[in-house]
Amino acid sequence: QKEVEQNSGPLSVPEGAIASLNCTYSDRGSQSFFWYRQYSGKSPELIMFIYSNGDKEDGRFTAQLNKASQYVSLLIRDSQPSDSATYLCAVNVGSSGSARQLTFGSGTQLTVLP
Amino acid sequence: DVKVTQSSRYLVKRTGEKVFLECVQDMDHENMFWYRQDPGLGLRLIYFSYDVKMKEKGDIPEGYSVSREKKERFSLILESASTNQTSMYLCASGQGGEQFFGPGTRLTVL
């Protein structure tokens, strides 16, 4: 069964702190991993993707992947109130043509307190 | 900027009605997707298409069908709407793993 698990939260951190969001997946064959951010009442938008074990940094965001342990995480450094949103983890579970089928976790709601 | 548009933001239909949700993208993407989003369940894939006239079932295709006659347009059809199809419906298009989402259609079936 293909599953992606996230802590639903809510997760609250003070402004300037590091927010750590975690995701585990069940399909060992998964090859690519994505983090989407969804503001309340808005659509998801892609913020990070990672394919290889280790860390990938983009500004204040760092994605971490450990395929042996089947987890992927997102760290947000120097958290800002504007980072308050729901963060969705997505895992590629199959392909048809060039389309990659993603399975999404249920999301973690993050609140950054001023 | 990639733009994905959906035909309606809010829609109210009655049980048994046939419902069409349309999605148009302007970036010449090969791949298009239909999801529904429900509280606590996250985003679930209904159908996707990787080329004109090509479609693949996602995780929850029951009660839905799709049509893709042109590359830029992907339609979701509810043949006979039921109350358990009340949900937020999101269309996406993309290349590779990156998907761009439309604004969503909030469908209520009474």
Image: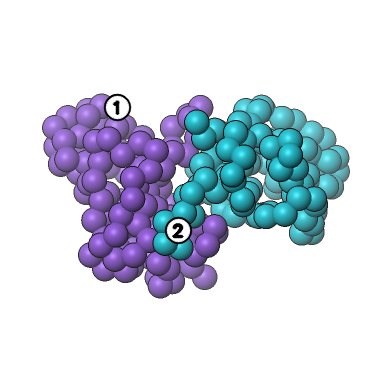
Chain colours: A cyan, B purple
Q: In this view, does A47 lie above or below B108?
A: below
Instruction: Specify whether disc 2 shares its chain with disc 1.
Output: no
Of tags 2 and 1, the one toward the viewer is 2
**Amino acid type of the residue tagged 2 in the rendering:** Ala
> Dot 1: what SS?
helix
Tell me the residue at 51%/42% (across/down): A103
**Amino acid type of the residue tagged 1 in the rendering:** Asn
**Residue B84, labelled with which disc?**
1
Subunit under mark 1:
B
In which quadrant of the rendered view does residue A4 lie? top right
How far from the left and from the top, in percent, is residue B63? Answer: 24, 36
Give how far apart the Cα atoms at labels 2 and 1 are.
28 Å
Q: Is residue B64 above or below residue B6?
A: above
Tell me the residue at 83%/47% (across/down): A77
Subunit under mark 2:
A
Q: In this view, does B102 lie above or below B36?
A: below
Looking at the image, which is closer to me, A10 or B50?
B50
How far from the left and from the top, in percent, is residue B55? Answer: 30, 54
- Which residue in the protein does label 2 denote? A99
Tell me the residue at 22%/29% (across/down): B82
